[in-house]
Image (spheres, rainbow, N blue to C red):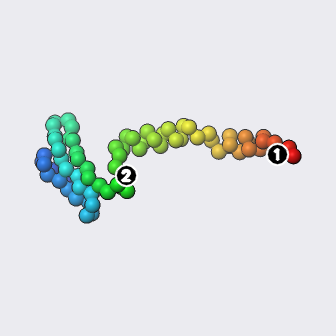
């Protein structure tokens, strides 16, 4: 992990296409501006964690799916 200090108005670059600028700072918060290509997803970490948790709780366990599949009757012709 790279750890650096930046002041308001200063920025860092990641590769040629991603720029992160410190817009505002206070003792407890930092406001960042992120410029990235459209194909690079930029999202807060807590959003990713919530999405993963939602997917996990929404999907039934594999055993349940297998049981449901075994209970299906073949179509009547």
In terms of image quadrants, where is residue 62? top right
Residue sitting at the far bottom: 16
Residue in the image at 22% along x and 59% along y: 13
Q: Is residue 39 left or right of residue 36?
A: right
In terms of image quadrants, where is residue 46? top left
Q: Report the disc number at residue 74.
A: 1
Counting residues from the N terminus, which is met first, the one under dot 1 or under dot 2? 2
Q: Is residue 64 left or right of residue 3?
A: right
Q: Report the disc number at residue 16.
A: none
Residue 37 picture location, percent across and down: 32, 57
- The answer to whether 17 is drawn above or below residue 45 in the figure is below
Residue count near mark 1 (Cα–Cα under 10 Å), binned few <14, some 14–19, many ≥20: few
Q: Is residue 57 left or right of residue 8?
A: right
* Residue 35 appears anywhere in the view: yes
Q: For this rendering, which residue is in front, 3 or 44?
A: 44
Q: Report the disc number at residue 41.
A: 2
Residue 42 picture location, percent across and down: 34, 49
In terms of image quadrants, where is residue 58? top right
């Amino acid at each position: 992990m790279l750890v650096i200090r930046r002041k308001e108005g200063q920025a860092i670059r990641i590769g040629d296409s991603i720029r992160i600028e410190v817009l505002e700072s206070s003792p407890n918060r930092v406001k960042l501006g992120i410029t990235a290509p459209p194909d690079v997803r930029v999202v807060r970490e807590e959003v990713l964690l919530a999405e993963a948790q939602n997917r996990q709780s929404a999907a039934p366990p594999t055993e349940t799916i297998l049981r449901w599949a075994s209970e299906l009757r073949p179509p009547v012709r």
